[in-house]
Image: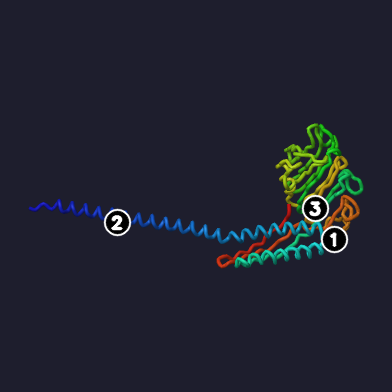
């Protein structure tokens, strides 16, 4: 009888070889497909970023223009809320005309439109020789009560008017600002020491001392939004104006400090007044001495659109100066 085992073994070996080659081809094909997909995804991501870059840049420019416009009209056009709104819309309209023209040169269509303005009140003292008492001379007084937001809190303090080297912040009549909101009460004390002026931020059970970085002409600045004292970093100031819900701002021992200050709240003077008029308790009317109030824009909303051949972008952005 003939021996058929060897041909069968050869056939089986050939089948295994063919199968292995087929699997190898499949794996190579899958690898190529995967690499192609990854490359295509990366390329699409890069292309999308490049296409969106002009729109992102334009949004940033629009926000910066809005911040500058708010600051400008608050200084120049603060005789009434209506004047402020007209001036702000006109300023942004002029900027939009120029900016959209420059973008059109590159073939892009850009537009900025004012869609909302939050009217507020600026509270200010610009008499550097005066202490921080209210307009009637009260050392303990409420600056504002029941506002939703406050921004741009800055003091320029005369070192010579501060309490010297206190051992007890409350008993030794140290000037301080209390901001009371849903987050509790945060206090900023300002006093002098043998090494120079400092502030002390008390937030809940935590107390942080920040020395003034520099004193120029006998004064230094406490800049809450920029978290600095005399130009030196003070991160403890960061949460001070983070005031969820209704907020009250009170000065205590205000006869123990002096200089200038400013802040902006998001309520108009008529809301701050207990009588519903534009006469605000503790503050003088504009042009009648410090401290006083003026009409102000707290913030605004802008609609920004940007279109190219490959991109159609639209967003509403908030504009709130620091």
Closer to the camera in the image, 187 or 121: 121
Pointer 2: residues within 10 angstroms few (<14), some, or many (20+)?
A: few
Q: Nearer the viewer, residue 231 or 216?
A: 216
Q: Position of residue 160 (x, y in %)?
A: 85, 38
Report, in whole angstroms, how far the alpha carbon at label 2 lies from the one at label 1.
84 Å
The answer to which quarter of the image holds residue 227 is top right
Residue pictured at 61% horizontal, 64% vertical:
313
**Nearest to viewer (mark 2 / mark 1):** 1
Dot 1 corresponds to which residue? 79
Which residue does the numbered mark 3 point to in the structure image? 146
Mark found first going from the N terminus, 2 or 1: 2
Tell me the residue at 78%/58% (across/down).
72
Q: CA distance from mark 3 to mark 2?
A: 77 Å
- Residue 172 is drawn in which quadrant? top right
Q: Nearer the viewer, mark 3 or mark 2?
A: 2
Residue 65's x, y, as percent? 71, 59
Point out which mark residue 22 bears: 2
Visual colour scheme: rainbow
Sequence-first tag of 3 and 1: 1
The relative height of residue 225 versus residue 174 in the rendered view (above or below) is: below
């Amino acid at each position: 009888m003939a021996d058929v085992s060897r041909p069968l073994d050869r056939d089986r070996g050939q089948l295994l070889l063919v199968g292995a080659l087929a699997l190898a081809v499949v794996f190579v094909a899958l690898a190529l497909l995967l690499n192609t997909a990854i490359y295509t995804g990366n390329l699409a991501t890069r292309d999308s970023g490049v296409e969106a870059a002009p729109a992102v840049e334009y949004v940033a420019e629009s926000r910066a223009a809005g911040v500058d416009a708010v600051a400008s009209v608050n200084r120049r056009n603060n005789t009434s809320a209506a004047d402020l709104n007209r001036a702000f819309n006109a300023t942004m309209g002029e900027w939009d005309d120029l900016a959209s023209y420059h973008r059109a040169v590159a073939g892009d269509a850009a537009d900025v439109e004012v869609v909302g303005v939050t009217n507020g009140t600026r509270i200010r003292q610009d008499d550097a020789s005066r202490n921080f008492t209210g307009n009637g001379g009260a050392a303990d007084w409420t600056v504002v009560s029941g506002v939703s937001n406050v921004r741009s809190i800055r003091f320029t303090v005369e070192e010579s008017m501060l309490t010297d080297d206190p051992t007890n912040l409350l008993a030794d009549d140290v000037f301080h600002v209390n901001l009371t909101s849903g987050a509790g009460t945060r206090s900023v004390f300002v006093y002098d020491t043998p090494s120079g002026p400092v502030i002390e931020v008390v937030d809940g059970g935590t107390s942080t001392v920040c020395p003034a970085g520099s004193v120029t002409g006998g004064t230094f600045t406490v800049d809450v939004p920029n978290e600095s004292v005399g130009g030196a970093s003070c991160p403890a100031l960061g949460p001070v104006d983070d005031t969820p819900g209704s907020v009250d701002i009170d000065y205590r021992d205000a006869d123990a400090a002096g200089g200038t200050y400013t802040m902006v709240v998001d309520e108009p003077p008529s809301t701050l007044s207990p009588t519903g008029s534009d006469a605000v308790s503790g503050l003088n009317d504009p042009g009648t001495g410090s401290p006083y109030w003026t009409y102000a824009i707290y913030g605004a909303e802008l609609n920004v659109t940007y279109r190219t051949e490959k991109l159609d972008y639209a967003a509403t952005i908030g504009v709130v100066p620091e």
